[in-house]
Image: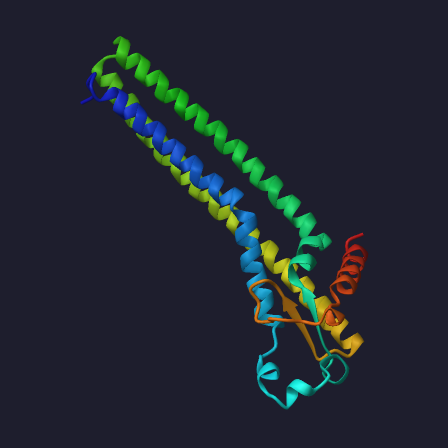
Amino acid sequence: MINSMNRPIVAAAAQSAALGADSQFKTAKYGMDFAMKRVFLSVIISILTINMFYGQNPVLQSVPLIADCGIVYVEIDVLTENYLMTIDLTAELDEMANSLEVDFVNRQEKFQANVRDYQLRAERGLETRARLEIIYEQLVYEEEQLIELAESYREELEKAQAFMQNQILQAIMDYLKEYGKEKGYRYILGNTFDAHILYADPALDVTAEVLEGLNVWYRENNK
C-alpha cells in the first residue's frame, strides 16, 4: 500500500534507477573508444610480435637484422588511427551509438515524466489508493524495461564494435602478408608503448609506407 510518507521515496528510487541505467549506457558508449583501442592493439601485437630470442642470444645480437633477417616494424597506434577503414567504420559506429542514445534518452525522459506525474497525483490526492497502486506497478515495470533496454543497447554496441575490430584486423593482416612477401621481409613487428620491443632503430620503421599503401588498397577496393 502506498502512503504519503513513501511516495517521495518511490519517486526518488525510480529516478535513481533510470539515471543508473542511463549511466550504464553512456559508459558503454563513451568508454568504447579506449576499450576498442586496447583490445585491438593487444590482438595485433600478439600476432605481429616475434619471439625475443633474437634479443637474448649474444651471437644473434651481432647480426644486421634489416639486411640479413628482413625485420621491420610498424607503429600500431599511428597505423590504426590513420587507416581509412578505421576512420570510416568508427564514424558508422558513432552514428549508431548516437542513434541509440537519443532513443534511450527519449524513453528515459518519458519515464521520469511519468514518475513526476505519479508523485503529483499522490501528493494532491487526485487518485484513489487502488489507482495509485496500479500506477506504481506500471512505473516499476517501466523502470525494469528501461534498465533492460540500456543493457540491450550496450550489448548491441559491443557486438558492432567487435565486428568492426575483426574487419580492421583482417584487412591489415591481409595487406601486411602481401606487403611482406613483396618486400621480402621475414618479420613485421608491431610497436606500441606496452609492446615487448624496448628499442627499435627508426631505420626499420615502415609505418608511413605501409599506411600509404594500406589506404590506397582500401580506396581501390571501396570505390
Residue at (52, 32) in percent of width and height: 103
Q: Quadrant of the N terminus?
A: top left
Q: Position of residue 188 (x, y in %)?
A: 69, 73
- What colour scheme was applied to this rendering of the protein? rainbow
Q: Position of residue 111 (x, y in %)?
A: 40, 25
Q: In the image, is 160 to the left or to the right of 107?
A: right
**Residue reaching furthest to the bottom:** 59
Q: Quadrant of residue 212?
A: bottom right
> Can the viewer see residue 138 in this picture?
no
Residue at (56, 40) in percent of width and height: 97
Q: Quadrant of residue 108?
A: top left
Q: In the image, is 30 to the left or to the right of 60?
A: left
Question: In this picture, is 205 found above or below 212?
Answer: below
Q: Position of residue 6 (x, y in %)?
A: 22, 22
Question: In this picture, is 87 found above or below 140?
Answer: below
Question: In this picture, is 42 found above or below 142?
Answer: below
Residue at (40, 37) in percent of width and height: 21
